Image (cartoon, helix red, strand yellow):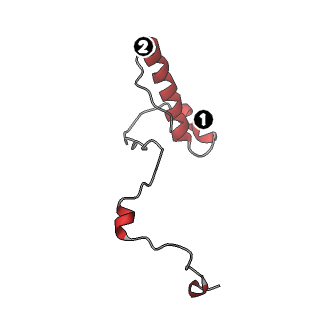
């Protein structure tokens, strides 16, 4: 099938104004940007996480976040957010 063969008659046209007022992530919390930094870790620790598969950075971040939340919980603070 070619593009010109597709029937678009039942799809309403979207103007630039509608796009500008659109909600991209309705009902979802905004995603915070990660901060890039250089962190020195023991080689065996890094290798172990790498062997766990892709997204090992995310797992390291989740572990650090869990530790942070535990410490914040012990001090009575509620400034925590979900791991991502």
Give coordinates of residue 25: x percent, y percent: 46, 50
Residue corresponding to mark 1: 48
**Residue at the (40%, 42%) spot, across then down:** 32
Give the Cα separation between the discs numbered 2 and 1: 33 Å
Q: Nearer the viewer, residue 52 or 81?
A: 81
- Please tell me which residue is depicted at 42% across the width and 54% down the height of the picture: 23
**Residue density around tag 1, few if under 14, some if 14–19, many if 20 or more, within 10 Å:** few
Determine crowd level at label 2: few under 14, some 14-19, many 20+ residues with C-alpha closer than 10 A.
few
When asked about the image quadrant of residue 48, the answer is: top right
* 12 on left or right of 50: left
Marks 2 and 1 close (CB-CB < 8 Å):
no
Q: Which residue is mark 2?
A: 76
Query: In which quadrant will I find the N terminus?
Result: bottom right
What is the quadrant of residue 55 in the picture? top right
Residue 52 lies, in percent from the top left, at 63, 39
From the top left corner, tell me how far across and down residue 24 is, in percent. 44, 55
Q: Position of residue 54 (x, y in %)?
A: 59, 46
Which of labels 2 and 1 is toward the front?
2
Asked if 37 appears above or below 3 in the picture, the reply is above
Residue at x 39% of width, y 71% of height: 15
Q: Secondary structure at mark 1?
A: helix
- Label 2 residue SS: loop
Residue 43 visible to the viewer: no
């Amino acid at each position: 099938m070619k593009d010109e063969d597709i029937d678009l008659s039942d799809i309403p046209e979207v103007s630039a104004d509608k796009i500008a007022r659109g909600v991209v992530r309705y009902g979802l919390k905004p995603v915070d940007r990660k901060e890039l930094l250089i962190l020195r870790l023991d080689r065996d620790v890094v290798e172990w996480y790498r062997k766990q598969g892709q997204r090992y950075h995310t797992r390291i971040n989740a572990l650090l976040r869990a530790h942070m939340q535990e410490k914040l919980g012990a001090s009575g603070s509620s400034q925590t957010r979900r791991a991502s």
